[in-house]
Amino acid sequence: MKLTSDVASMIVKRLKATIGHHINIMDEKGMVIASSDEERVNTIHTGAIEVLQSKKERIIEEQLPLLPGTRPGVNLPIEFLDEIIGVVGITGNPKELLQLAQMTKITVELIIQQDYLKKHAFFEQQLMHSWIMELISTNDLNEEKLTKEAKHFLQIDLKIAYTVLVLEVFTLSSINDDLWAINEKKEAILSALPLTKMDISFASFTNEELLVVGIPSDELSVANDFYRLLKGLNAKLFSTLKIGVGNSKIGLIGIRESYKEARQCVHLMNKFSTDKTISQIQSWGLIRLLDEIKPSVREEFLAQYQVGNLPLHLRETLEALIENNHNINDTSKKLHIHRNTLHYRLENIEQLTGLHPKTMNGLALLHILLIFDKLRETF
């Protein structure tokens, strides 16, 4: 790691008020890159060069001609990851400063470590976001690049199966939330994930504000445990939550497909009235199949049969007939109407659509058309 003037200046700014002596920070070449005495910045500190060469402290009792650019004080090596990356010096009487200088050295190293970890975590988070977005968004998948990043930077083992979950957190943004508030909530959500103790291999928000989570498991029931743990951690933040669950799959293409399935679950939960908070892709059956049909083809059928123009009471009648498997008695009981009223309504449906709901073929096509109509709705 290279000690930069930005980091060094930040350290000097933090410490100069509490130390009570001038503090200097030198880089790996002995150049003063930050100092509470601004005149010393960008000068060579020969005492620091000795520290860098000997890897030991250098105490300067008095200003010596042989050590130009130095003043009395204590100079100590700055160590990070078993390397000396610079020198910190305190100006003053060495007999009075040795203990203070040693404490300052420790403080400087801790600040550098914290800064490194913070930047590393930010880099990893940004890389994770980019990796996930490229995996789920790009048509031309760069498998070699994504595989290398998964292995060397993100520690994602592509040889095992992953279940991908897509979470829609409704409390993520509200009318009064600005971008700053939304980002704070995102950070709170991402910080909560490790606390669930689930084995999460990757997680990031998409540009649609959906949270993508990958769990190394071939058990689809893992979503139920995840949901319960999230609610237990922060009931307010996760008060309204929908989770779509893809099938467990292996490899980059598998993760990509599992994401698409989980994303489709969330999409369908929003289209169809359901009290479910967790949805698995295989539970959607016919609806999932019809959702794959091109919108233009769906619109062509809807225009032909005009199901979208059915009055609400006829639409509810048709839905009840489908729900009760074409059973007239059960449907009339469900709707609390007489059988004759039900037959009259079914005849009205035939007049408006050209399809007779009393026949299996007619009812099957009407069922499909209702789903088409539901899929076109926007919220």
Image (spheres, rainbow, N blue to C red):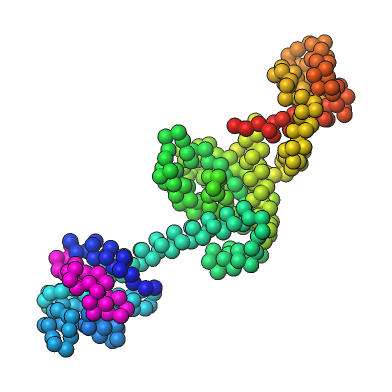
**Looking at the rendering, which quadrant does residue 62 occupy?**
bottom left
The residue segment tinted magenta is 18-44
Q: Residue furthest bottom?
A: 66
Can residue 108 be seen in the rendering of this structure?
A: yes
Identify which residue, 179 or 230, lies in the foreground: 179
Query: Up-down: is 341 above or below 260?
Result: above
Question: What is the total number of numbered labels drawn onto the structure image?
Answer: 0
**Residue at 11% over, 76% down:** 93
Q: Is residue 7 found left or right of 288 in the rendered image?
A: left
**Residue at 83% over, 30% down:** 364
Can residue 220 be seen in the rendering of this structure?
A: no
Image coords of residue 18 (percent x, y): 18, 62
**Looking at the rendering, which quadrant does residue 8 occupy?**
bottom left
Image coords of residue 10 (percent x, y): 28, 63
Residue 26 is inside the magenta segment: yes
**Looking at the rendering, which quadrant does residue 27 occupy?**
bottom left
Q: Is residue 140 found left or right of 322 in the rendered image?
A: left
**Residue at 85% over, 26% down:** 362
Image coords of residue 327 (percent x, y): 83, 22
Query: Up-down: is 353 above or below 154?
Result: above
Identify which residue, 282 or 180, lies in the foreground: 180
Q: Is residue 369 found left or right of 255 in the rendered image?
A: right
